[in-house]
Image: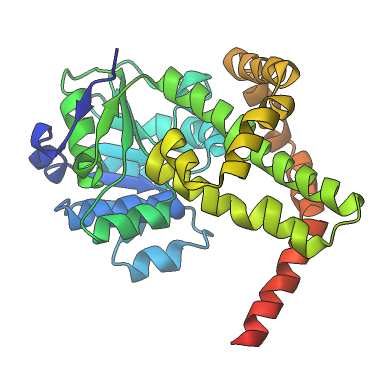
Amino acid sequence: MPLPVYHDRDCDLSIIRAAKVLVIGYGSQGRTQALNARDSGVSQIKVALKPESKTRTKAEADGFEVVTVADGVAWADVMVVLTSDEAHQKLFAEEMSPHLRAGQALIFAHGLSCNFGLVSPPADVDVLLVSPKGIGPRIRDIYVAGDGVFCLFAVQQDATGKAKGLGLSFAAALGCGRKGIFETTMKAECESDLFGEQVVLCGGTRELVTTGFQTLVDAGYPAEVAWFETCYELKLVVDLLWELGMSGGFEKISNTAEYGAYLTGPRVINATSREAMQGVLKDVQSGDFVRQLMRDYNAGSPDLLGRRAALKDNPLDETQRYLDGVANAAS
C-alpha cells in the first residue's frame, strides 16, 4: 500500500510560524533548514552552537542569533537537531535533557539516534522525523528556485496530540510540500537509509567504481580510458535513470550497452552479493553497525579517520586530477 503523502495544501504554515524554533547545528542541513524556514515566514529562529564552532561566524552573517544549546532549549518550543548522528547521545544527555519541558517538540532529520536508543526523550515531549531527501546546499538552491524536494516524515511520539500538524508545518516551511511529504516511521527511514548508503549509494558505488577501474588498469588499459568508462560516464547513466526510470533510461543507451547489461549485471550482483546485502541489513537492524560506529566515535574516531586518510591516495583520483588539469589547460 502506498505511503500517505501530503502537499502544501495539507499543511498549516501558521503552526510553525507561531513557534520559537531552535536549529541545533549549522552545517549543510542546519544552514539550509534555518534559511528555508525563515524565508517561509518563521520569524522566531535561533541557532545553537558550541562556543568554538567554526560555523558561528556564518550563522551570524546570515542574520541568526547564536546561543548555547542549553539556553536555546530553555527558550524554544521546537528544537531541530541537525548535528552529526554520533554526537546526539552526549549532546542530548548533557546539554538538552536537563532543560526540556513538557509540550516541547524535538525534530530529527534522521532516525538513527531515536531508533537505536542513543537518545531517550521524556514522554511529555513530541518527537518527530522531518527528513528532506537531498544534500543541504542543493535543497536550498531548489527552494530558492521555487521548487522543493521529497521528504520523509514520521511521528515517533505524540505527547501533545498536535505533533503531526507541527511536523507537516515544518516540512512545508522547508519547501517539501511543493514536492511531496511521505509519512513513514523512524525505523523504516533509519534502517533503509543506512542500508542504502552502505550497499548502494556510498559503499557499493565506491567499491564498484574503484574495482572496475583497477581491473582495467591491471589488464593494461590506459588509466584515462579506464576513468572515463568506470567513473565519468557513471553520472551520465545515473542522470538518465533518475530522469526516465530504469526502463526509460535503458531505452536511451546503445543496444550494445543494454544487451551487455542484461548478460553481465547478474554476474556481478549475484547470489553471493545478495547474501552479503542480507548480512548488511541484519547488521543495521540489530544495531551492530551503530554500536560499532559509537565505539569508534567514543574512542576519537581512529578507524573512520584512518580510512578517510587512506582514501585520499588512490589511482582513480590521481587520474581525475590529471584530467582536470588537461581540461583547465584548454580554457
Q: Give the residue at x 45% y 54%.
A: 28
- State the image coordinates of residue 78 (x, y, percent, origin top left): 26, 37
- Residue 271 visible to an observer of this rendering: yes
Q: Give the residue at x 20% y 41%.
A: 172
In the rendered picture of this protein, how many numbered marks are placed on residues? 0
- State the image coordinates of residue 100 (x, y, percent, origin top left): 33, 30
Color style of the picture? rainbow
Q: In the picture, which quadrant includes the C terminus?
A: bottom right
The answer to which quarter of the image holds residue 325 is bottom right
Task: From the viewer's side, name the closer residue of 262 and 76.
Answer: 262
Q: In the picture, which quadrant includes the N terminus?
A: top left
- State the image coordinates of residue 46 (x, y, percent, origin top left): 29, 53
Task: From the viewer's side, name the closer residue of 107 and 230.
Answer: 230
- State the image coordinates of residue 286 (x, y, percent, origin top left): 61, 12
Residue 172 appears left or right of 278: left
Relative height, residue 273 to residue 249 (above, below): above
The answer to which quarter of the image holds residue 128 is top left
Relative height, residue 226 to residue 256 (above, below): below
- Residue 82 visible to an observer of this rendering: no
Task: From the viewer's side, name the closer residue of 228 and 22.
Answer: 228
